[in-house]
Amino acid sequence: MRYLHTMVRVKDLDASLRFWTDLLGLQEVRRMDNEQGRFTLVFLAAPKDLGRSAIERSPEVELTWNWDPEDYTGGRNFGHLAYKVDDIYAACQRLMDGGVVINRPPRDGRMAFVRSPDGISIELLQEGEPLAAAEPWVSMPNTGTW
């Protein structure tokens, strides 16, 4: 058995793709539009997984957009997705500059939490050793839930 992907339902595909690709840094690897089922599937991968074999790759994120409007609730009870990043401060700054709230700032130089436009909690973890404590992160309070 091999873990393949996590599916997340999204209300606004454009807003979700902006978050997951432009701000978080994942890359679209394939897309499927299903006219009969009235949905679109978009599969995303971490940049370091591109070019790796299917067995070496980390699981992907599958964004599922149903063409007919639907409200989704309970993003928190999903839990969270976790990604290692090369520089947690730079990743958080890029997200914040893009209008994303840093719910749990990386005060420890190691871990942060943000939410996607659909309320999915995402944990960011510093690759390797934690970075040295730095402002504005050290003084930034938690916001909302994660």
Image (cartoon, rainbow, N blue to C red):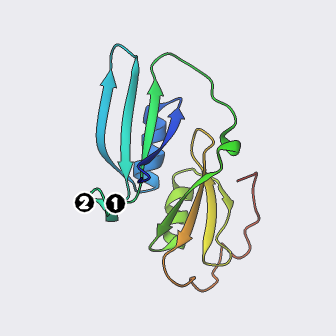
Q: Secondary structure at mark 1?
A: loop
Which residue is painted at 46% across and 53% down in the image? 23
Residues tagged 2 and 1 counted as in contact (Cβ below 8 A): yes
Q: Secondary structure at mark 2?
A: loop
Mark sitting on residue 57: 1
Mark sitting on residue 53: 2
Q: Nearer the viewer, residue 144 or 41?
A: 41
The crowd level at tag 1 (other Cα within 10 Å; few <14, some 14-19, many 20+) is some
Farthest top residue in view: 36
Q: Position of residue 114 (x, y in %)?
A: 62, 55
Farthest front residue in view: 1
Marks 2 and 1 sit apart, C-alpha to C-alpha, by: 6 Å
Q: Position of residue 61 (x, y in %)?
A: 44, 47
Type of amino acid under label 1: Arg
Which residue is painted at 76% across and 51% down in the image? 144
Q: Nearer the viewer, residue 32 or 58?
A: 58
Q: Is residue 130 above or below residue 13?
A: below
Q: Is residue 128 above or below residue 91?
A: below
Q: Is residue 73 above or below residue 79?
A: above
Which residue is painted at 44% across and 73% down in the image? 86
Q: Nearer the viewer, residue 1 or 91?
A: 1
Type of amino acid under label 2: Ser
Q: Position of residue 134 (x, y in %)?
A: 63, 81
